[in-house]
Amino acid sequence: MERNVDYSVRPRYEDFILNLDGADLRFLLSRTCPAADTSAAGQEAVELLMSQDSAHTALSFCDPDVLDVAHLVHILEDSASLDTLTEVAYWASDADVMAHDTPKGVDRKRRRVGKQQLEHVLRRGQRQGLVWEEPAGVWHVPPHISEVFPAEPSLSFRVADLVANMPADVLSRRMERMGLEPDSARGEGAPRALNASDLTVRNLQARQVEQIAGFLCDPVKVRALVMTAPVDIRNELRWMATDEKYLPSYMWSELRADAVRWAEERLLLTVVEEPAMPVFEQEAEAHNGPTEVARLVGAVALALKGDMWSIRKPHPTESFPATLESKELTEASVAAVAFASAFMDAAGSGDGRLKDPLHMYEESSLLWIQDFAASIGASGFAAPWIVEMLVNAGLIHADSGHPTPRALQYWYNADASTRWAYLVAGFLVGRGPWHGEFPWVTVGVDDLSHATLAYGYPFAAREVVSLAAQLEEDQKFYGCCVEGHMAWNVDNLCARNGADGDAMVGWLLEQAGILGILYHGHASWQAMAIMYALHDIWLTDQHVGAQRIAELIAEYAAGQVPTAEAVQIARLFKDAAPNERLAATLDGVASNQVALALDFIGDRETCAETSRWIISEESLRRACLAVDGDVDVLFSQLGPLVNSSMKLVIYAELVRITKTEKLQEMYEREAVESTPSLDDVPENAAPETDTGQRVSHGAQTDGSERTADSGHADTSEQAEDSGDSDNSEGLEGPEQLSLF
């Protein structure tokens, strides 16, 4: 295995691509060119993999530790041996990665990276398109990656910049002080004089740059050279490497000036002019000349930093006994499906409970979604997220808010578990680049960055599920473990594409909590169902749509979210409005038929794990008007509710309406309300209809609760009162009836 790298002989990344086998090439294409054809080969694959878009994607989706190790290779002039890298590679401490209190305490020491560990990270980097190995033990950064690599100011100064515009005699003198022969070949062996053919291929200065790079990119040689300096100069150079601040020359101390002169004579740094502004205005007035700063070569600064430049590592995840039961996570899933069902029913019925939005992602749409949630007793916080999932799953049009053909085909006939699967699919696929801007993305990012974030969001959502699936049902994660794990997967993506990583993590965790996938650090069957359903797809890096994802999840989630058919009805006596006497309650998600029936005769008060409808005088009167007073038609509309005691109770309340005044007369009075003339008021004595007869019979069987209302002795008086009321209140509307 090579220790020293010959910078005069660099392999070509094109040749590496052409020599890849089919499986590795397809994986690399899918990783760095997600929009391209993965069957590309030969020169077409070379052009795709060495494009700027490919470099942008590779850097956005690489793991943080892979990025840090590749950065080390980049600092060492894009080529470094494994032995050289082990000299400068240190793991970050637990304190660097959001440590939490544990019985064993926090380890704050940074340790060297082992050779095997480093090689493992490098091989992951090769699969992610950031580095490649050629020959064995020597690693390189591809040129298209090197051009767009994120710059670290204190480590970005290259050897080529060091010798640029330097007189040949000065360069030769300084190389000799380093211990290099200006005309010798690089390496540890005897010097070799350059012949004429060498000089025709490359000029002398380029050859010297390669020699200098070979020396400065070896941290052992750099440290040995610095050890020959006086102690105070040695310490000052180390301070300059770790300080990461560039003081202008007029602010140098005498020691700093001596250290700069010593290092400059040995090609460790150079003094350059930079348009840096002085810190204070008075300093600007006192100094009128150009601003000069000392720049250490990046490889030299890396060698002198020691453990100050560390490689990130994942936050250690740790669980402890859970504080919530599994049923509470199921209740969260039920509440999400219950609101989604209510929203879809309202969006599909056109009954006026929802306004038609101009666009689902406008601020006004957010307000009316929250207003609708408040009207049915649902969570105003969760409502916009759930609607977002419905849009992402292709069930709601983003531009109109109306159900899509997919919703008409799959949603309305689905059980509660299947509906939950559709919500999860909407969460996993994300909004996509065609559904408006992401709130956590800085305004003005280019199209490539926005597309990268849209492509990366499903990968981040996948990590939430992956983390939750690691938990046992009786365990939970510390909050820092959840945040640390998610930051590991999204920070690099967001930092490179103009997005807020914390906001993206918050978005993901809020949706996961609403669905019960990861709820306050707890997990249950939800995460395992998703993982079982999608494990093979995720493992093979396949891209499937929301419909297929929902179908797969529904198979494993079957029966987990209860669909409620049994309705409990009870009378209200306390803490109720004067006209509210009945409450219909059910646990779980109401089926579509049950929900429509209850919406027909009542008003939803609560929409959560337990849903409740209030049946009042107004709601029953509205239902009667909708069926033109035909009780048989009304009961046919109620569908599954027409059973056992539910029918009897509702029938009894309808009797209260029709007992005082027949339904036909009620409809005639409704017409009077909108008529300005008294001539159009119908006569009071209308013949009794069959419906009225049927209702009167029901009234006689109602028992003692209606005794006061149904006395035969007062029949004539009631008729007179009714007639008088008709004559006196014809213009003001119908008589206000009391059902109860």
Image: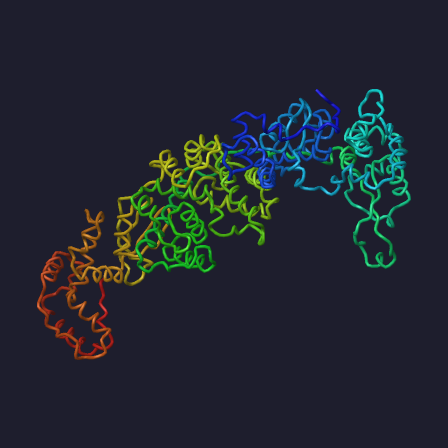
Q: Nearer the viewer, residue 245 or 324?
A: 245
Q: Quadrant of the N terminus?
A: top right
414 left or right, relative to 87 = left
Tally the numbered discs.
0
Q: Is residue 436 above or below residue 156?
A: below
From the top left corner, tell me how far across and down residue 586 is, in percent: 30, 47
Q: Is residue 612 above or below residue 544?
A: below
From the top left corner, tell me how far across and down residue 161 is, in percent: 78, 40
From the top left corner, tell me how far across and down residue 202 is, in percent: 78, 32
Q: Nearer the viewer, residue 332 or 182?
A: 182
Q: Nearer the viewer, residue 702 or 181?
A: 181
Question: Residue 95's image quarter?
Answer: top right
254 left or right, relative to 307 = right
Q: Is residue 276 visible?
A: yes
Q: Nearer the viewer, residue 51 or 377?
A: 51
Q: Quadrant of the C terminus?
A: bottom left
205 left or right, relative to 472 = right
189 left or right, relative to 434 = right
Coloring applied to the structure = rainbow
From the top left corner, tell me how far across and down residue 461 is, in percent: 49, 40
Question: Residue 739's image quarter?
Answer: bottom left
Q: Is residue 492 visible?
A: no
